[in-house]
Image (tube, grey):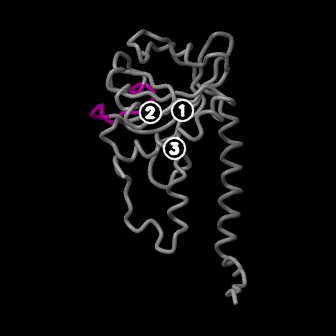
Amino acid sequence: MPLIISHPETNPEIRKIEDEIAAKKEILAQLIAKEKGTQISDYTFLDTNNNAILLSDLFGEKEELIIVFYMGIQCKYCTLWADNYNGISAPLKDRAAFAVVSHETPEIQNKIKEYRAWNFNMYSRTKNTFAQDLGFTNDEGVPMPGVASFIKKEGNIFLHHRSYFGPGDNYCNMWDFVSILPRGINKWEPKINY
């Protein structure tokens, strides 16, 4: 005879906090949508073939662009975030242009993409001050991970919003999944190889 288990109700306090987080995220999205943005230069990057490409070209046919600032393969955390983009890059590109930039050369980026089987566009910022100008390096010039959104209006580019990455942020679902396990995150850390 099969064991029949009644479905336990979620702790009301947990449900209340989840509802509060959802409501706060909606408020946050509304506030971000109202940001006026700051006009920025049309920076030059290097594409996978080591050719110069302008920031304005990264938009393609879209008016909006999301750029992720990747610290490189040496950062197992950034690599975890980037592994997530494989699953969402097609839907993201349906809504807005999407790209990942890092300080590596195109040759190194191509090796990383092949090694990780990444399907999104990467561009090198080795020859510009894009990350520094937008606040994605620390005082010593070390790259910092994060994401920024942009809009192109009448030929001008505007930085709309930027946010930094860290465990538990809104940009890597791994942390949300692991946090609902009975033992929680339990000191788990990402790896380059699993």
- Image-quadrant location for residue 51: top left
**Residue 131 in picture, x, y percent from top left:** 41, 27
Point 44% across, 33% down: residue: 69
Q: Around disc 2, counting alpha carbons within 10 Å, would you say few (fewer than 14), some (14 to 19), or many (20 or more)?
A: many
- Image-quadrant location for residue 37: top right
First in sequence, mark 3 or 1: give its number: 3
Q: Amino acid at mark 1?
A: Ala
Badge number at residue 121: none
Q: Amino acid at mark 3?
A: Asn
Residue at the spot of label 2: 69
Residue at the spot of label 3: 84
Image quarter hosting the N terminus: bottom right
- How far, Cα to Cα, is label 3 from label 1? 17 Å
In this picture, which residue range is highlighted in magenta?
131-142
Q: Do the numbered discs 1 and 2 sit on residues whose CB atoms are within 8 Å?
A: yes
Residue at the spot of label 1: 148
Q: Around disc 1, counting alpha carbons within 10 Å, would you say few (fewer than 14), some (14 to 19), or many (20 or more)?
A: some
Q: Which label sits in the foreground, 2 or 3?
A: 3
155 to the left or right of 181: right
127 to the left or right of 147: left
